[in-house]
Image (cartoon, rainbow, N blue to C red):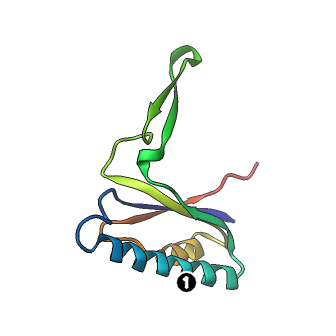
Amino acid sequence: MKYMLLIYEPHDAYTGDNGEALLMEIVGKHMALSQDLEQNGVLLGGDGLQGVETATTVATGEGGVQTLHDGPFAETREQLGGYYVVEVADLDQALAWARKVPVAVGGKVEVRPVMIY
């Protein structure tokens, strides 16, 4: 089955005096995880995302009227920072990989099956 591992972190996780150093540490861990996923033949794709300040959202309202909004879909303290797409046997394996995804304190990894049409 295909699963998406969605990486959410607090919007201010990499600010402050140690922010840049923490970011470089986390990025290094992502590089190692990507290599591990590839070597195990489960990685289908994945990328980091630019910050929420670069986001534009298309919202569809009544009658199909669409409006554009600067920023992410929802204003929250956490932001979607990246994702991995993996193909594994089952949810347990997807969760095992999700536990290896490096995140800053307060970060979360959401695991969702990909719909197959």
Q: Secondary structure at mark 1?
A: helix
How many neighbours does mark 1 have within 10 angstroms: few (below 14), some (14-19), or many (20 or more)?
some
- The image position of residue 74, as x and y in percent, is 39, 41
- Does the rendering let one see residue 2? yes
Point 62% across, 63% down: residue: 3
Q: Quadrant of residue 36?
A: bottom right
Point 55% across, 17% down: residue: 65
Point 27% across, 74% down: residue: 18
Name the residue furthest top.
63
- The image position of residue 64, as x and y in percent, is 58, 18
- The image position of residue 98, as x and y in percent, is 50, 72
Q: Quadrant of residue 15?
A: bottom left
- The image position of residue 22, as x and y in percent, is 34, 75
The residue beneath circle 1 is 32
Residues 7 and 12: in front is 12
Point 48% across, 81% down: residue: 29
Q: Amino acid at mark 1?
A: Ala
Q: Quadrant of the N terminus?
A: bottom right
- Does the rendering let one see residue 100? no
Please give the count of numbered marks on the rendered protein: 1
